[in-house]
Image (tube, rainbow, N blue to C red):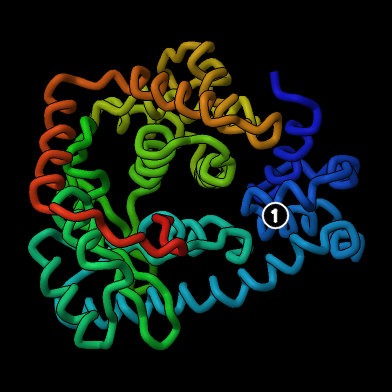
Amino acid sequence: MMSDDARRFCRVLAALAPDGPTRASDVQAPGLDDRAVALGLGPAMYAAAQRALAHDDRAAARFPRSRAAYFRAAGRTSHQLAQAESIAVALRSAGLPAIALKGIALARRYYADPAARPMIDIDLLVRGADLASAEAMLRRAGFTDAVDATFAATLRRRHHHLPPLRDPAGGELIELHHDLLPRASRVRIDVDALWRRSITEPDSALRFLAPEDLYLHLAIHLLHSSAVIGRIGALLDLHVLATTEMQRAPDFGARLSARAISLGLSHWAGLAAALSHDVFQTDLAGDRPRNSIGVRVSPRQVRRFRDALLSPLERPLDRAQHDRWMRRKLWLERPTVLHGLRLAAGALMDAVRRPRPPSIRPATYTSG
């Protein structure tokens, strides 16, 4: 079970969703400010506290560190959103449409306060046939490689996006994706279908994934393609998206379930929905059992993922515990022999093509 401290922490964050709980007593719990900043959730915590306290000045007094992080994030997020639009306009004028992924899409369409959803980089999906032209356009505009040549070559061979490019003026990182998952991933998604289902907004040059597709992408990115440990903010994204869409259309849960089944992702969608309900009380069920989107998920599996997700709030994981969790996660992903061979082949090719140790990767670069 979640501890009372963890439960209060998550209840405050849940206030970022439409009609989220606004218990002032939770906001007054000790230690929220330091925990939020340590987890990289300072902006989200301060925005949630403001909402819970009806923008009372007490939020500034109780969350000084989160408040500072919030105002730093506000300026940068505003700049990133504007830059994403500028790039989309330039690409569209050349006949190269772009879909906003992850942070850009969430801050633009789902968070009432975009500063509550800071991002490390700008993720854009372009068609595979347009990838080279889109990269060339950015390079002509002055964008340069943000990682060393060795790491860049590995990304090109094995991953679903180009090496990150850095804007020389603002310093922002841009990742051009041609797929949603690495080439060696056991899970595959029909990217052409994503494009056919993508949507537009009147005041934006960007395209956006259909809500069900965005939810599934975020779920896979959290549960299948990451270490999960401590990534409470990623689960919060799913909660805010689902709650917003359920408010817009109560049948969102049913549409999500149908879409997940059609893509063969029902296990991961069900696990994400169960986790979100367990931690944030997200209700995607409609007329089905409250903690499900129509997919049976093992309570033990939910508990294991939840424990890893909330481990920084409960107790720090040592290295042995971390390694044990990663081995367990590989088993939970049910890898196939073909998937293992793909991973082994990729590692072998890297060893053959890279006879000397690679240079250290920039510490500031992570995917976001």
Residue 232 in the image: state x and y as whole percent: 58, 41
Which quarter of the rendering shows the C terminus? bottom left
- Say few, some or many: other residues with alpha carbon within 10 Å of mark 1 (under 14 / 14 to 19 / 20 or more): many
Q: Quadrant of residue 8?
A: top right
**Of residues 343 and 32, which is closer to you in this image?**
343
Q: Secondary structure at mark 1?
A: helix
Picture layout, residue 145 above or below residue 199: below
Front residue of 100 and 37: 37
Residue 293 versus residue 300 in the image, above or below: below
- Residue 19 in view (yes/no): yes
Give, as a three-letter code, the residue at label 1: Val
Taking the image as shown, residue 244 lies to the left or right of residue 210, namely right
Where is 220 relative to 89, above or below? above
Residue at horizontal 48%, vertical 35%?
A: 228
- Determine which quarter of the picture holds residue 173: bottom left
Q: Quadrant of the N terminus?
A: top right
Q: Nearer the viewer, residue 5 or 219?
A: 5
Residue at 70% across, 38% down: 10
Could you tell me residue 174's position as x and y percent? 34, 69
Which residue corresponds to mark 1?
37
The residue drawn where x is 70% and y is 30% is 314
